[in-house]
Amino acid sequence: MERITAWSARTPRGRRQGANARWAVCIALAFAGVTTLLDWASGGLTVARADLWALLGVAAFTVLRPPRVTAGGGRLTVRGFVRVRRVRIDALAGVWLDGRIATRLILWDVHGRRVALDLRALAADPVLWHELETGARRSLERGTLRHGTEILRLLGRDLDDTAARGILGASGLE
């Protein structure tokens, strides 16, 4: 079986992940820069306080940076700041939706590993959705997917409708 790493060019990644990470860096730098500048303008800036503002900027980046979602080789990986979670999408046992406002898709494989995935990551990247759908279809064929087939079907329909509306809107037909 071919192993595809997260840095491979063939691994599907969210299209907006790079933009979201740049946004987090810009906000963190702006925060650290403005607080340092204000402290300097007030005349109270010291090396220790400058270090504090830099540390708070790093903390802001840590909080704002979105998790990176990759798929390939039968796996779906969600890399957060602290944890890396992987699930075998070709050996799924169940799929659940969690949350009413910020809806997450929870995937559980037969090995007991679990991943929570923001639905916006799937909506932003059709290739990532295709990998998940292909893996779920394999799980269904093998008989391991026992819960959540209706959720995946409805989610696929919603994502297809959203993509079709986007294409029609871009072409001026909507």
Image: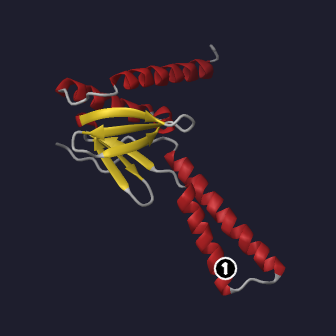
Eyeballing the image, is 47 above or below 134?
A: below
Please identify the residue farthest to the right as the structure is shown.
42
Name the residue located 30 percent from the left edge and 50 percent from the top edge: 5
- The three-letter amino acid code for the residue at tag 1 is Ala
Q: What element carries label 1?
A: helix
Asked if one can make out residue 7 in the rendered structure from this viewpoint, the answer is no
- Residue drawn at x 52%, y 43% is 16
Query: Where residue 139 appears, x then y in whole percent?
Result: 23, 30
162 left or right of 111 in image: right
Identify the residue shown where x is 57% and y is 36%.
101
Task: List the residue tagged with mark 1.
Answer: 50
Left or right for 169, reference 147: right
Mark 1 surroundings: few (<14), some (14-19) or many (≥20) residues within 10 A: some
Tell me if residue 122 comes above or below residue 84 in the rendering. above
Q: Nearer the viewer, residue 99 or 54?
A: 99
**Quadrant of the image containing the N terminus:** top left
Q: Residue 140 placed where, x, y %?
A: 24, 25
